Amino acid sequence: MDPQVAELHLEGLGALRNRHAKGSLEKAVRDLRLAHTQRPDDRDICADYAEALLWTFDQTKDHEDLILAEEVAKRNAQRKLASERASAVLGMILVMTDRPSEAVPHLRNALELSRSNTRARVDLASALGKMGQAEEASTEFDRATALDPGDWYVHNLRGMFWMDEGRFDLVEQEFQKVARIAPGNYQGFANAGSCALLHRGDRAAARTQLEAALANNPPVVMAGEIRRRLGWALLVDEPDRALWELETATREAPANLECAMVLGAALMSRGGSEGHARALEEYGRALRLLDQRIRRLSKHAIDSVNDRINRSLCLAALGRSAETATEIGRLVSEASKNPEAWLVSAIVESMAGRKDRALEAMRIAHRLGISEARMREEWPLKPLLQDFTGDECPLRKKT
């Protein structure tokens, strides 16, 4: 290999491994793109470039990065003799885009080539969990932890797995491990804060964790996402500061549709004609971003349940009742075990004035793991909580 290309690859790989430091991921993409341009057939350069693009998408949520990452990884992994790295990276991309069954063969191939590939094993565990194979997933997480107990990525994905399983007693333990193992990594603090807010309703704990995440200098776009969560945590006790955080979040992450939606919800919950008008503007902006994203992804056969959930919320907020009913009906039919889909169904029914149907959707969401504290965060559900008793449907707890 040309020494200059080898140096670019080495520099880019080093920056990729240190991607949470400010500017490192941008350097990784820049160096690996140049190396890939000069050596497009080098399997390891291709895999590293695809991974750099994937983590760029994870931060920016720009699906052009995701689509390019998949194209690069797929060309590499579908060769007659795919490399371990190529298979592992393509598997990781497919897991992150909710295509676990497609990811499993690539991840198993990576592990056949190297049984000690911790990242491939934990991605396999995550894929199995998404496919409903919880016992097999837990076994793979145990193996990944045994291989490298100090890998924050293992604990981060295991926390996500426990969240999907409704085991919120274990979720925060995993995210706290991330914060201890990698104290300069904002992700453990951010995830622990989100869990404290959404699943325990503990605003004080959420604020502490989210402020710690911001103190770890996340990239600007991710800072916007963290401020969004912090603004939501502050909304009841410090509404003025909450709105400041949410406004700042939309400036720092203008393409983040969740920032627009939370700001819209905050403005609408405060009432008043001016706030209502601004809320509709934010929901309209979020819907435009969503439709652009869904169109791009559909060209590559990627269908995101979360995007469709958010689209239902935007349509409901904008008063487009017929479209909302169609969208949410499909969602709860196709994703009947997704607690967020049922929570949004409850919100939609409440906003349409269908109290009994909203309460039933709340009960199903609760059975699937949505706490009453979480429901109190959604302003359309507040009037219904006096008629909703958690004893009717205890929180799901899997073993």
Image: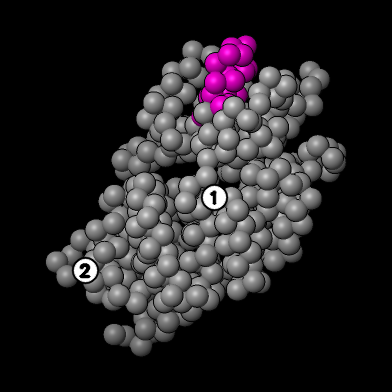
Give coordinates of residue 201: x percent, y percent.
Answer: 71, 43
Q: Residue at x 65, y 43 (%)?
A: 198
Q: Position of residue 398 (x, y in %)?
A: 48, 47
Residue sitting at 58 percent across and 35 percent down?
394
Figure check: 260 above or below 70: above
Residue 92 visible in the current orientation: no
- Whether residues under marks 2 and 1 lie with C-beta atoms below 8 angstroms apart, the answer is no
Q: Residue 319, relative to residue 118: is it above or below?
A: above
Residue ID for mark 2: 82
Q: Nearer the viewer, residue 363 or 219?
A: 363
Given residues 369 and 253, the one toward you in this image is 369
On the picture, is 3 further left or further right than 235?
left
Write the residue at 39% across / 48% down.
130
Residue marked by disc 1: 167
Question: In the rendered image, which quarter is residue 70 located in?
Answer: bottom left
| Residue 197 among those drawn in magenta | no
Q: Is residue 22 left or right of residue 273?
A: left
Looking at numbered disc 2 in the image, what kind of residue is underneath it? Ala
Quadrant in the picture for residue 78: bottom left
Identified by mark 1, the residue type is Arg
Q: Which residues are magenta?
A: 342-363
